[in-house]
Image (cartoon, helix red, strand yellow):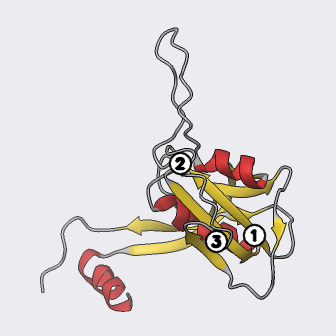
Amino acid sequence: MTMVRTLLENRFGLKTHREERTVPAWTLTAEKPKLRKADPANRTGCAEGPGADGKDPRITNPALSRLVTCTNITMQEFAAQLPRIANRLNLLNGPIRSAVQDATGIRGAWDFTLSFSTDSGPTAPAGDEVPTPDGKISLSDALTQRSGLKLQMTKRPAPVLVIDHVDSVPTDN
């Protein structure tokens, strides 16, 4: 990275600096938490597929295409993993471009399972049509329904890279 940066600075006259700006970013909050206390002997993390109990809600509702089981995980660790979970299939109308901030206030490690649809999203009915229930659940709805957590867009300070100057034509070798 240092070599690439030096190349860009020398050949394109690139000048940058970092500063804090208020930007839209995702925040994880708790409404009415529905989490199970974790067994500290279990490995920490989130993985695709059913948990130790083997229950898979996708069998009864085929519209649920993803199942993520988190074990022995803190809310801070879960917030850090949410971009990977969501960005895998572009689930929140675009990738999560910043770290998810944990604002739940929940301490300790927890176990929970999220089952959701990869192609669900807010859609408006055309004309006077009434949308038919198809069993699809978005990631944000699954967070709220299954775990009592809420993922919402807020504005907060974050470090950003500002480009002060760049030449459109590079210098010769």
Q: Secondary structure beneath disc 2?
A: loop
Identify which residue, 12 or 67, lies in the foreground: 67
Q: Secondary structure at mark 1?
A: strand
Q: Of marks 2 and 1, which one's residue comes earlier in the chain?
A: 2
Q: Image quadrant for the N terminus?
A: bottom left
Q: Nearer the viewer, residue 9 or 69?
A: 69
The amino acid marked with disc number 3 is Ala
- Mark with earlier residue (3, 2): 2
Out of 162 and 41, give the one closest to the viewer: 41
- The quarter of the picture where residue 34 lies is bottom right
- Residues at marks 3 and 2 touching, judged by CB atoms closer than 8 Å: no
Q: Residues within 10 Å of mark 1 (few under 14, many from 20)?
A: many
Q: Looking at the image, is 53 positioned above or below residue 121?
A: below
Q: Which is in the foreground here, disc 3 or disc 2? A: 2
Crowd around label 3: few <14 · some 14–19 · many ≥20 (10 Å): some
Residue that badge 3 annotates: 80
- The numbered mark at residue 64 is 2
Label 2 vs label 1: CA separation? Answer: 20 Å
